[in-house]
Amino acid sequence: SPEAYFRALEEWLEPLSLQVQAELADYENKQKIRQAVQYIRENFRRPLNMTIVSNEVSMNYTLFSRLFKQYTGENFVGYLQELRLAEARRLLLETDWHVNEIGSRCGFTDDKHFLKVFKHSAGVSPSEWRRSSRCRPEE
């Protein structure tokens, strides 16, 4: 009968519809995380935190945190810190700016924090890293 046919069709379509909706939501979330990563890359020199970035992409803070780690492989703080450290290493090699100025230009708001984070990452202070990196022969 037509009613049985439509009921069977509806039973078949409902899970398919739910799957499509879930995949669409997943795609939209990935797009938001990509947008967030781009925003971080463009603004890491400014004061940033996860609240600012999650608001920028209109995403719930908790969901953002989970999806960011899933997408990038690291947590927000680690990702932001590595961007800042990479820029600091670049500036240490390419400029003669004072270490404190480099830390500030890379988004670190506190000199002591910059020195501590850099030393933890590189094993030496920024000044020592600069000296040893500049003394190495070109590879």
Image (cartoon, rainbow, N blue to C red):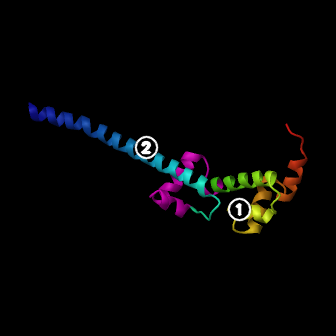
Q: Position of residue 122 (x, y in %)?
A: 80, 53
Residue 110 image-quadrant placement: bottom right
Amino acid under disc 2: Tyr
Q: Position of residue 48 (x, y in %)?
A: 59, 63
Q: With respect to residue 81, does 30 lie above or below?
A: above
| Closest to the observer, 124 or 3 | 124
Disc 1 crowd rating (10 Å Cα; few below 14, some 14-19, many 20+) is some
Amino acid under disc 1: Arg
| Closest to the observer, 104 or 2 | 104
Q: Is residue 58 left or right of residue 137?
A: left
At 80% across and 58% down in the image, what residue appears?
119
- Inspect the magenta stretch and tell me whether residue 60 lies in it: yes
- Inspect the magenta stretch and tell me whether residue 9 lies in it: no
Q: Which quadrant would the C terminus be assigned to in this image? A: top right
Q: Is residue 101 visible?
A: yes
Most extreme residue toward the left, as rendered? 1
Pair 2/1: label in front: 1
Q: Which residue corresponds to mark 1?
A: 105
Q: Position of residue 3 (x, y in %)?
A: 10, 35
At 90% across and 41% down in the image, what residue appears?
137
Q: Is the magenta region chiefly helix, strand or loop?
A: helix
Q: Is residue 75 visible?
A: no
Element under label 2?
helix
Element under label 1?
helix
Tally the numbered discs: 2
At 65% across and 55% down in the image, what residue appears?
78
N-terminal-most mark, 2 or 1: 2
CA separation in Å, label 2 and label 1: 35 Å
Q: Position of residue 91 (x, y in %)?
A: 76, 54
Q: Which residue corresponds to mark 2?
A: 27
Region of the chain picked out in magenta, as a range: 50-78
